[in-house]
Amino acid sequence: MTGSRRIRVLVVDDSAFVRKAIERMLGTVDDIEVVGFAADGEEGLAKARELCPDVVTLDIKMPRLGGLETLERLMAEQPVAVLLMSTLTQEGAEVTLRGLELGAMDFVDKSSVQPMSMLSLTEELVAKVRALGGARVHARPRPARKGAREAPGAPPAQCVVVAASTGGPTALQVVVSGLPAGFPAAVLVVQHIPRGFTKSLAERLDARSAIPVREARDGEAVEPGTVLIAPAGIHSKLARRGGAVVVVLDEEPRDALHRPSADVLMASAAEVYGPLALGVVLTGMGSDGTEGLRAIREKGGLTLAEHEETCVIYGMPKAAIEAGVVHRAVPLERVAGEILAAV
């Protein structure tokens, strides 16, 4: 952001301590400016209309007008990049995922806003506000089912590995809901998300999809027509045991930036399935998935990335495209169709 205007942030939270803490954390950098505060949803909506911020940090639980109701009205009246302040509980996970469906782009763990943990949270908060400050606020696309095979006579893919980060839960809903009952390949998903969220994510996707979606379990068989979500906090890999392909949950590599890592899962899929693996990278921060797509492509498999025009954050797809490991970039609403054409 050097040489350009600062990212303007509105902080909406009923806790005076949290409001002050967020201001202090964001005040550690020069490219972000907290332009206003609100103690509840009604005040937040008024301040958003008045200040036109680039990013709104929004508490989920507030008096008068709650966070989800505020979010819904905000996205209808004045769409803006919203960062939810959530709690890592089962109830908090479900409410947070509902917020992402309603248009929020990302979230941070509000319970981490404590004097002893603020230093580590500052880095995450600043990174996410910076990412959202340049994000696109899109209308939710509808899935489409048309696509074109990469090459005539190419063997049908048997395993699809999808990677996503910021903006991923909503993007995954578009992709997974576009896959029909009887889908002939296995699907595995890496979504960068904290521990405790993947089970709720899987349940929400399952309720909206024609094919079953569940959180992956160590040792379970990978089967066609099923979507497995890699559990947060540990790597998922694929391995052949006898005549079956199974999921292996593994702590290694411990030095990976993300756990689960899309690179790790895709590389194992490339080894197990060879040219019958298909890799897809959707919206998200960073570059996870680039080396995984490289491994799949080198084995003869098809690689896809979400097109910049529909990405919330054009980080992961951009990194993969610039590395030359993507066969084709397509808008989000066409991803399911491209997958269908390849299987």
Image: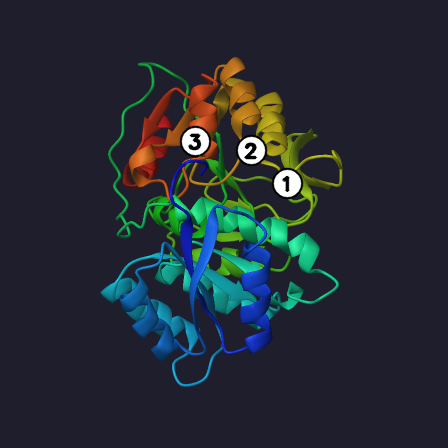
Element carrying mark 2: loop
Q: Which residue is mark 3?
A: 317
Q: Which mark is residue 119?
A: none
Query: Is residue 274 shown above or below 242?
Result: above
Q: Is residue 302 left or right of residue 111?
A: left
- Give whichever of 153, 102 is nearer the camera: 102
- Spatial distance from mark 3 to mark 1, Cα to Cα? 16 Å
Which comes sooner in the sequence, label 3 or label 2?
2
Residue that mark 1 sits on: 258
Among the two numbered marks 3 and 1 on one chain, the one whose residue lies closer to the N terminus: 1
- The amino acid at mark 2 is Asp
Q: Position of residue 255 (x, y in %)?
A: 74, 35
Q: Amino acid at mark 1?
A: His
Percent across and percent down for residue 197 are 57, 58
Q: CA distance from mark 3 to mark 2?
A: 9 Å
Quick one: label 2 or label 1, which is nearer the N terminus?
A: 1
In the rendering, which numbered label is found on residue 288? 2
How packed mark 1 is, by other alpha carbons closer than 10 Å (few <14, some 14-19, many 20 or more), is: many
Closer to us: 19 or 156: 19
Quadrant in which residue 250 is drawn:
top right
Kindly report the distance in space between the C-alpha atoms of the residues bearing marks 2 and 1.
8 Å
Residue in the foreground of this view, choosing between 51 and 201:
51
| Residue in the picture at 23% in, 66% down | 77
Is any atom of residue 87 visible in this view? no
Query: Residue 4: percent from the left, percent from the top?
Result: 39, 39
Circles 3 and 1: CB distance less than 8 Å? no
Residue 36 higher or lower than 255, as above or below = below
Q: Please say if the residues under marks 2 and 1 sit with CB atoms less than 8 Å apart.
A: yes
Q: Residue at x 51, y 55 (%)?
A: 202
